[in-house]
Amino acid sequence: MNKITLSILTTLFVVSCSQSNQEQAPEQSVVEYVWHTAGADFTAQNLAKLINEWNQIITDSGMAMNGANILTPTVSSEDYDFIWVIKWPSMSARDAGWDYWMANASEQWAQSIEGIMSFDPDNAFAFSVIDFTAPKIETNSESFSNRFHFCTFNEGYDNSSLDTFKNEVDSTVWSDTYWHATLEPTFNPDPMPDFVWLDLWANDADKDLALDKFMESEYADKYLEMFSCNTADFNGTVIR
């Protein structure tokens, strides 16, 4: 991959080490989303080979990385066919990772993916993980479902309203595997959302169960009253 110049969840904040006696603020984990387009030679088998090659590069590099996923939209998009998601423990780890990649792997990777997939470095987007609520039951599934909410506050509502809503949502078990995170872009999207809320479930059945329960609750009306949101749904596969 070419270096991403923009300064993909789900991990605890990591406190950076310091040689000084001064306490440093914790670094936030980062989730980076890289849009990809499938080429003429794209097949599941070719993708699997590339995933294996990419994982070997990451392992050999020793770079700090918390994991990686591939997201496929449930509704086709003219902007991408799938998204390669990279989870970093911090922005500094992300920058160091891409520095290694540019110096040691980018040219070979460009040859490996030729005809199978492509991407534009301008379509890579990193988000800080601001907060998250863990699921009631942890799963080891290699697949999952998620939904992004890109939201602005309606008149009369603000971050304190979001905090109240989050606490109310967290007081209910929507499904055993449901969890969510709030993300903050490290770039300047147009328009800029007031917040990004990410829902995650173990599978589509669990997702449907949770959404049905939510729509029957009092919180559905509160959501519409407080926020104006655009949503996007994906099926995910864990690749690292």
Image (spheres, rainbow, N blue to C red):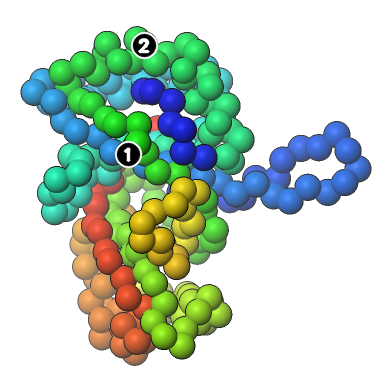
Q: Which mark is residue 99?
A: none
Describe the element under mark 1 as helix, strand or loop: helix
Lateral position of residue 92 relative to residue 215, left or right: right
**Residue 108, image x and y in percent?**
34, 10
Q: Which mark is residue 107?
A: 2
Q: In which quarter of the view is residue 81 placed?
A: top left
Task: Return the residue at label 1.
Answer: 123
Lateral position of residue 159 relative to residue 216, left or right: right
Q: Residue at x 38, y 23 (%)?
A: 2
Q: Nearer the viewer, residue 112 or 150?
A: 150
Q: Nearer the viewer, residue 70 or 140?
A: 70
Instruction: Bin the neighbour count of mark 1 within 10 Å (Cα to Cα): few under 14, some 14-19, many 20 and up.
Output: some
Are the residues tagged 1 and 2 within 8 Å (C-beta)? no
Q: Residue at x 42, y 13 (%)?
A: 105
Describe the element under mark 2 as helix, strand or loop: helix
Tell me which amino acid carries mark 1: Asn
> Which image quarter is the C terminus in?
top left
**Residue 207, image x and y in percent?**
26, 64
Q: In which quarter of the view is residue 86 placed?
A: top left
- CA distance separating discs 1 and 2: 19 Å
Residue 70 lies, with reference to residue 175, above or below; the image says above
Lateral position of residue 170 relative to residue 13, left or right: left
Tell me which amino acid carries mark 2: Glu
**Residue 1, image x and y in percent?**
36, 23
Q: Is residue 70 visible?
A: no
User: Farthest residue toward the right?
Assistant: 21
Q: Residue at x 26, y 13 (%)?
A: 112
